[in-house]
Amino acid sequence: MVPSKAPRHFLTLDDVTRDELSHIIQRAIELKKIQRAGNSPELFKNKVLGMIFEKSSTRTRVSFESGMAQMGGHAIFLSTKDSQLGRGEPVEDAARCIASMVDMVMIRTFEHKTVERFAEYSRVPVINGLSDDHHPCQLLADIQTFVEHRGSLAGKTVAWVGDGNNMCQSYMQAAALCDFQLRIATPKGFEPWDHMLEKCKDRVIIANSPQDAVTGADLIVTDTWASMGQEDEKKQREKIFYGYQVNSELMSHANRDALFMHCLPAYRGKEVSAELMDAPDAVVWEEAENRLHAQKALMEFLFNQ
């Protein structure tokens, strides 16, 4: 049966309000406690999530698939290499067909417009599992992790060190929703898009150096210097980003109780030093686990719209 109203999608953080984001985070924390107590409710019973992967994945696939299973639902893995999407089927056609057979769709892809086009023709909720422009699901996990350790992000300072990529741009959107200041340290020419900087100018500062960005910060975040699809640029980027490594020395300029996060996979000795990955102020492993709980809360929220 076709839904009586348009589905609610989650393509960027701008698709939720501040209150809705707060609800999702608090529910994620609650679901985490429930799951650890061994009492996961089957709220997704008879629900099916279609997962479309154009980009390879570890944490995104495991977290969504496990989340559906823990809540009594089922997930279907679709790689574009093994489906008609990889043979040139229009996204619009695939959206109409797939959405008629599942209850929700998650897409991990390159071009953000692919997610937007799929959502436009889907009659069920669509989640952006990652695109070249945004990674909103990871931000849910990051926010949850900070809230669990330090409380609200409101009034805090977050430092982004590295490429002005999809993660950085999602942090820019989070700055407004969570009421924090974001300082971005990135080499010239690797800044986030101009229209994003203009839109977020009240919350975002481009710093002159990693130390300038990190000084007095409550949270320091980085990501790989070469994202998927940029493998040919890896050696060149390593030279350009030399000096942007997050390590113990750089962390010493942040607030004493500052946390370090990385969405993973991390390249130890490149964007982050090996010793920092296992340091007490690095919460990357809990951050990774929280993808599971945050996404369960997100899916529940979308199912209930």
Image (tube, rainbow, N blue to C red):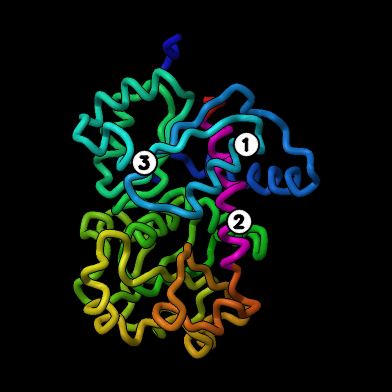
Residue 163: image quadrant is bottom left
Judged by its main secondary structure, the magenta piece is: helix
The residue that appears at 67% across and 64% down in the rendered structure is 149
- Locate residue 252, reporting x and y percent: 54, 87
Q: Which residue is under mark 3? A: 79
Is residue 170 rendered to the left or right of residue 296? left
Can I make out residue 10 in this image?
no
The residue that appears at 34% across and 50% down in the rendered structure is 55
- Locate residue 241, reporting x and y percent: 30, 80
Q: Which residues are magenta?
A: 284-302
For the residue labelled by badge 3, is the local secondary structure a helix, a strand or a loop?
strand
Q: Nearer the viewer, residue 24 or 69?
A: 69
Q: Nearer the viewer, residue 228 or 129?
A: 228
Q: Is residue 196 above or below residue 262?
A: above
User: Which of disc 3 and disc 1 is earlier in sequence?
Assistant: 1
Can I make out residue 258 in this image?
yes
Q: Is residue 82 above or below residue 275?
A: above
Asked whether 293 falls inside the magenta stretch, the response is yes
